Amino acid sequence: MSKKKLVVLSGAGISAESGLSTFRDTGGLWAQYRIEDVATPEAWRRNQKLVLDFYNQRRREVMNAQPNAAHKALAELEDHFDVTVITQNIDDLHERGGSKKILHLHGEIMKSRSSADYQLLYECRGEIHVGDKCELGSQLRPHVVWFGEAVPMMDAAIEETGQSEIFVVVGTSLQVYPAAGLLNYSPAGAKKFLVDPNKPDIMPVRNLEMILEKASVGVPQLVRRLINDFK
Ligand code: APR
């Protein structure tokens, strides 16, 4: 019998207990930095060093972080369901937690890319500095989607979400589009779950159960339920 299709949409909250800052919680990244200084094409044009240093710091933090119980529980689902993890996160904790099918809507901090060809990517396990060039001779940049830039993986994410029988949202304020809109692409009949200690400010959604817990508690609990209920 084919496995039911289960799609996950995760945000910074799933990595909070791994020690990585969220964006909009108290003391989050956007309380420490201005988005327009470090996460827009204009910022890149204005001050490449500031932007590179911001992401070098975040890459160091990701390399020092470990996947938590929520990342690992999502990987366990793959024995029982056809799982796709759609993440807004640029960390590699889903990969290191064992998930196999992952779509990074906002890019990946452990990769750099050419400024001249957005498809020319390189592994990056260190720092990027002004003067570091791609093989075409253009400045290397973080492989991250900045505000105002296209989200190339969005069509694939919509396609996956549209086929989901179970849709699980973990650790996102659902404030940033187009990612936040994915919840509306899950079929009306799909069972939807949302794990977050705070109730997000969203319109009511049919078939949505809120689990007001932090990810490391709520996700393993939900995974045990799903495996039990849907096997
Ligand atoms: N467990 C689960 N959820 C948590 C936890 C936790 N331990 N701690 C915080 N959260 C929740 C918060 O309640 C909030 O709903 O995680 C969410 C974090 O929201 P944001 O900081 O807005 O992060 P996110 O939704 O991922 O932001 C989306 O915005 O700045 C851009 O590109 C960036 O991908 C990011 C996008």
Image (tube, rainbow, N blue to C red):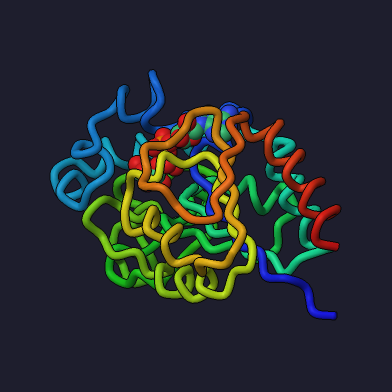
Q: Is residue 125 left or right of residue 205?
A: right
Vertical order, 47 against 179 (above or below): above
Vertical order, 120 against 132 (above or below): below
Q: Quadrant of ligand 1?
A: top left
Say which of 59 and 107 sits in front. Answer: 107
Q: List x then y, in percent, for residue 180.
A: 39, 53
Say which of 192 and 43 sits in front. Answer: 192
Q: Is residue 78 left or right of residue 29?
A: right
Q: List x then y, in percent, for residue 115.
A: 29, 63
Image quarter for residue 183? bottom left
Image quarter for residue 217? top right
Vertical order, 171 against 18 (above or below): below
Asked if residue 20 shows in the view, the reply is no
Q: Residue at x 30, y 23 (%)?
A: 31
Question: From the image, which quarter does the C terminus lie in?
Answer: bottom right
Asked if residue 119 shows in the view, the reply is yes
Q: Residue at x 46, y 41 (%)?
A: 172
- Marks counted in the figure total 0
Q: Residue at x 63, y 65 (%)?
A: 84
In the picture as drawn, the residue positioned furthest to the top comes out as 27
Q: Is residue 231 left or right of residue 89?
A: right
Image quarter for residue 216? top right
